[in-house]
């Protein structure tokens, strides 16, 4: 069994997904790994991608949205861990995945981790993810949009990590996916993400972890970091989905008895 399957969702961002794949090939982890690319609303440009070994691309005619594509990709794999990544992320070293897996291997009660993320789109580089702290009712981004001066290369239990780069324990993923309350809301889901078209799917997975006996951690030490060019993949119409996704998220949380904002 592989250590990790990395699922990357692409939607008309072929230069970005090509960059992600190139960075994976350059900075392969020691852990056994594969990459599955779900190419939403695929075009002929998919054939221009340079595919390293252990990379599979699944062209999909429709635009499934982020969560449904992640669920599909995860359902095609059987690894110990599932990595979910936006196409506007990429690796900058060969330590990131190994460090996250090592931490989770040493802490079996941890269900989700997220590495430190920052943007290089403009100088100086700024943080885009260092964990979300506070409470489920009052979450707060830690370090978002702050200039990188060396902070947040730490390990901290958090409320959630963002879905642009998150690694999930397979057992925790399956516990959510097979839960009767989850199935009531999302009977056809192939994975543990509520299939909102955009937004709140990563929040739901992280908020559910304590209910199933797991913790969520930001892991940013020992090279667990990568680039994420914030919201480069959403486009102008993405925000139209926010209101409905928030409603569906709150309905599921209420049914689970989980506090939320």
Image (cartoon, helix red, strand yellow):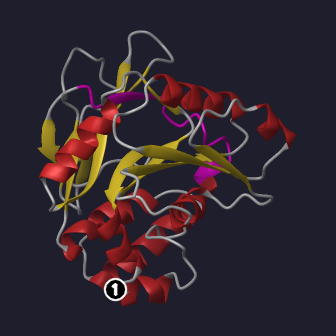
Residue 88 picture quarter: top right
In this rendering, position of residue 55 left or right of residue 107: right
Q: Which residue is drawn at 48% across and 70% down?
A: 191
Instruction: Judge whether residue 60 is colored magenta.
Output: no
Residue 131 visible here: no
Residue at 13% from the left image edge and 50% from the top image edge: 106
Q: In which quarter of the image is the C terminus?
A: bottom left
- Measuring from the top left, give residue 249's x and y in whole percent: 43, 71
Magenta-drawn stretch, dominant element (helix, strand or loop) = loop
Which of 237 and 228 lies nearest the eye of the viewer?
Answer: 228
Residue position for label 1: 255
Q: Which residue is drawn at 35% across and 59% down?
A: 80
Percent across and percent down for residue 118 are 38, 26
Give the tally of numbered discs: 1
Q: Please, is residue 28 above or below residue 93 in the view?
A: below
The image quadrant of residue 179 is bottom left
Taking the spot 43% from the left edge, 25% from the top edge, the residue there is 27
Q: Magenta segment range?
A: 223-239
- In front here: 257 or 220? 220
Vertical placement of residue 169 versus 154, above or below: below
Q: Is 101 located above or below residue 221 in the figure?
A: below
Taking 218 as reference, is 156 left or right? Answer: left
Q: Name the residue nearer the viewer: 34 or 224.
A: 34
From the top left corner, tell me how far across and down residue 252 is, in percent: 39, 79
Mark 1 neighbour density, 10 Å: few (under 14) some (14–19) many (20 or more): few
**Element class at badge 1:** helix
Q: Quadrant of the N terminus?
A: bottom left
Residue 26 on image: x %, y %:
49, 22
């Amino acid at each position: 069994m592989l250590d990790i399957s990395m699922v990357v969702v692409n939607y008309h961002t072929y230069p970005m997904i090509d960059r992600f794949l190139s960075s994976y090939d350059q900075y392969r982890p020691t852990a056994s790994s594969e990459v599955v690319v779900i190419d939403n609303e695929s075009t002929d440009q998919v054939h221009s991608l340079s595919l390293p070994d252990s990379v599979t691309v699944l062209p999909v005619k429709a635009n499934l949205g982020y969560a449904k594509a992640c669920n599909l990709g995860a359902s095609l794999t059987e690894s110990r861990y599932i990595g979910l990544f936006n196409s506007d992320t990429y690796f900058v070293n060969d330590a990131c995945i190994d460090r996250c897996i090592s931490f989770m291997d040493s802490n079996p009660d941890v269900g989700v981790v997220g590495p430190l993320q920052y943007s290089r789109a403009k100088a100086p580089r700024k943080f885009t993810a260092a964990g979300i702290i506070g409470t489920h009712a009052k979450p707060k981004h830690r370090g978002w949009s702050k200039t990188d001066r060396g902070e947040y290369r730490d390990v901290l239990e958090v409320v959630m990590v963002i879905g642009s780069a998150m690694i999930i324990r397979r057992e925790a993923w399956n516990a959510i996916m097979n839960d009767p309350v989850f199935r009531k809301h999302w009977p056809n889901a192939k994975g543990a993400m509520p299939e909102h078209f955009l937004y709140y799917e990563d929040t739901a997975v992280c908020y559910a972890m304590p209910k199933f006996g797991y913790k969520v951690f930001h892991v940013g030490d020992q090279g667990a970091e990568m680039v994420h060019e914030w919201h480069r993949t959403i486009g102008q119409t993405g925000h139209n989905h926010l209101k409905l996704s928030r409603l569906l998220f709150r309905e599921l949380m209420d049914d689970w008895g989980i506090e939320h904002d």
